[in-house]
Amino acid sequence: MIDLKFLQNNFDLVSQKLQKKGVDSAVIERLGEEFASLKAINAKLEAAQADQNQMSKLFGQYKKEGKDVAELKSKVDANKELIAGYQEESRSAEDALYTIALSIPNLPDDDVPHGEDEHDNIELRRVLEPRRFDFIPKEHWELAEMNGWIDFERGVKLAKSRFSVLKGQAARLERALINFFLDQNAKRGFEELCVPFINNEAMLQGTGQLPKFGDDLFKIEDENLYLIPTAEVPLTNLYHDEILSESDLPVLMTGYTPCFRKEAGSAGRDTRGMIRQHQFDKVEMVAIAHPDKSDEVFDMMVENASDILTALGLPHRVVRLCDGDLGFSAATTIDLEVWLPGQNQYREISSISNTRDFQARRAKIRFKEDKKNRLVHTLNGSALAVGRTLIAIMENYQNVDGIIEIPEVLKPYMR
């Protein structure tokens, strides 16, 4: 959640940043109105409390002077009722402001480039040259059919569209990728964790999926529980409402989970194949860092994801997102996009974000420094999206006869 004190002192600046992130001006205006309402009622409350203190002091003076305190007592009692009313109004105004603030995205960092959407993102560098084929490379669904790797029809039969079944070599390759990713992350100091795939509402609110993106989540009927959309949710919230010591930082975590998303806003996009599924596997990196060190951790996470793709021999590019394309919780994001020769384009395979203290404020994750509690910075990123890596291997390692080679680094994991 954005810092409401910062909002109070810098409303115009915050408004400009939020507009760059696509927040409707009417929402920003309402946020300002609710903040002004809270400020006004708190001013009345403080004035009434000051009057109460002043009148309370008069009791002693009146008794010394032998004055009748009946009228004063009546005024004090009436003012108490006034204060109680103001306190209730203040709580209501705070709740209204908090409710709106929960739906307001994080502010982009000052150095995030301005732009409307993904077309305005900035390519920072390319890693590895795409292979030159002496035949027209096939897309992954064609290769899947030729090799019997993916059964899309039975995935639909078992569930509905955008579900699939991996078979034989593809299923083994999926498992090999998960283990390879976890091992590579461990070499960078990330502790492997196995977490619940179902989380409660408070956890999803803590990392920013709720209330804004409730329509994209699979909710458990008659339960305050949801299937997780990413391991970012349980990994980050392991420290929900906790205070760490400064020496604990950074906390580096990695974990494999399936991820579940309704893809509510992607109707008509990537309907063929496995690019956009309702259920997909991912290995996630999450870091909880000291605010002064989070940029350093962020760079390490980007480098790690890129190194994994390089080890797999997959050409990719590193892209800095503009403010109009940033995710809800992100202050800054670097995407890694892998080359898919069958599609003749780069596609996102990892998105690494620093949320600064946005999630920490929502989830109440703090650390103690010089006997004071401070909010940590939280970071998250894929290393990597497993299904998309499988697709990239299929398309980049295909032969003219449709046979798919296995990258050398994965062969020990395929035994």
Image (cartoon, grey):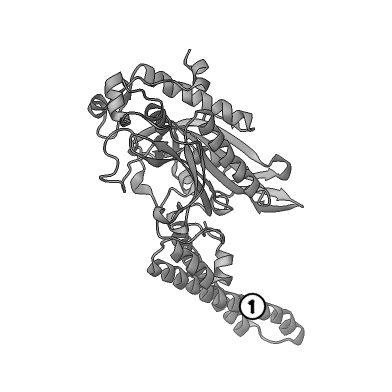
Which residue appears at 60% of the width and 75% of the height? 46
- Residue 154 falls in which quadrant of the image? top left
Q: Residue furthest front?
A: 134
Give the left or right position of residue 102, taking residue 354 as reference.
left
What residue would you read off at disc 1?
Answer: 50
Instruction: Determine if residue 390 is in view.
Output: yes
Where disc 1 sits, the SS reads helix
Count the marks: how many? 1
Which residue appears at 43% of the width and 54% of the height? 325
Instruction: Determine if residue 242 is in view.
Output: no
Which residue appears at 35% of the width and 29% of the height? 134
Residue 383, image x and y in percent?
Answer: 51, 35
Give the left or right position of residue 161, taking residue 68 as reference.
left
State the residue in front, 30 or 137. Answer: 137
The amino acid type of the residue labelled 1 equals Ala
Residue 223, image x and y in percent?
Answer: 37, 39
- Residue 162 falls in which quadrant of the image? top left
Give the left or right position of residue 388, taking residue 382 as reference.
left
Residue 228, image x and y in percent?
Answer: 42, 38
Residue 412, image x and y in percent?
Answer: 52, 16
Q: Against 244, is 139 above or below?
A: above
Q: Against 192, is 357 above or below?
A: below
User: Which class describes the residues within 10 Å of circle 1: few (<14), some (14-19), or many (20+)?
Assistant: few
State the residue in front, 75 or 296. Answer: 296
